[in-house]
Image (cartoon, helix red, strand yellow):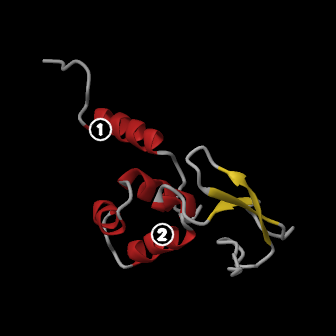
Amino acid sequence: MVRIPVLCPYCQRDEVVKRGKTDTGKQRYRCQNPDCSHQSCLLAPAYKGRLPEIKQQVLEMSRNGSGVRAMARVLQISPTTVIHELKKRADPHLRQHSTRENIATRRRGSQHRSGGGRRSG
């Protein structure tokens, strides 16, 4: 019998045991390292966007100036996944207001500048 060591994809430790199967039949593993942020993992998830390596590549590509659609195309993941990962990892100082607040502020500001309302004539 050949024994293959299984490493946790999050903490890279070998304190991993089998923990059942998913609905699609993939083997699920449990990391027994108490310091690991994830208790359950799959070695080959159905969607590549969940892999830590892919998430790291998204961050590296964004630092190099790649666009969202280009990253999604190269990594073969959804653009929505790319955007979600970038938002999760963004510097909190860059996120001062939500997008809705920025749009509402811009709309209010343009009304004031254009002198909206009635003209006296």
Q: Position of residue 56 (x, y in %)?
A: 51, 73
Q: Position of residue 8 (x, y in %)?
A: 70, 72
- Outermost residue, left side: 121
Image quadrant in which the N terminus is located: bottom right
Task: Identify the residue at horizontal 48%, vertical 54% (top origin).
Answer: 84
Q: Is residue 17 left or right of residue 56?
A: right
Give the residue pinned by disc 2. Answer: 54
Task: Identify the residue at horizontal 84%, vertical 71% (top origin).
Answer: 33
- Outermost residue, right side: 34
Q: Is residue 103 left or right of residue 14?
A: left
Image quadrant in which the C terminus is located: top left
Q: Position of residue 40 (x, y in %)?
A: 72, 58
Task: Identify the residue at horizontal 44%, vertical 54% (top origin).
Answer: 81
- Outermost residue, front side: 1
Q: Amino acid at mark 1?
A: Ser
Name above or below for residue 49 compared with residue 23: below
Give the residue pinned by disc 1. Answer: 110
Task: Identify the residue at horizontal 47%, vertical 62% (top origin).
Answer: 48
Q: Give the class, few, some or many, for how many residues have Cα within 10 Å of label 2's Cα (few <14, many ≥20).
A: some
Q: Position of residue 118 (x, y in %)?
A: 22, 18
Q: Amino acid at mark 2?
A: Ile
Q: Give the class, few, some or many, for how many residues have Cα within 10 Å of label 1's Cα (few <14, many ≥20).
A: few
Name above or below for residue 46 compared with residue 34: above
Q: Is residue 14 left or right of residue 58?
A: right
Q: Quadrant of residue 32?
A: bottom right
Looking at the rendered structure, the secondary structure element under dot 1 is helix
Q: Is residue 31 left or right of residue 67?
A: right
Looking at the rendered structure, the secondary structure element under dot 2 is helix
Q: Earlier in the sequence, mark 1 or mark 2?
A: 2
Residue situated in front as seen by the camera: 90 or 110: 90
**What label does residue 68 carry, if any?**
none
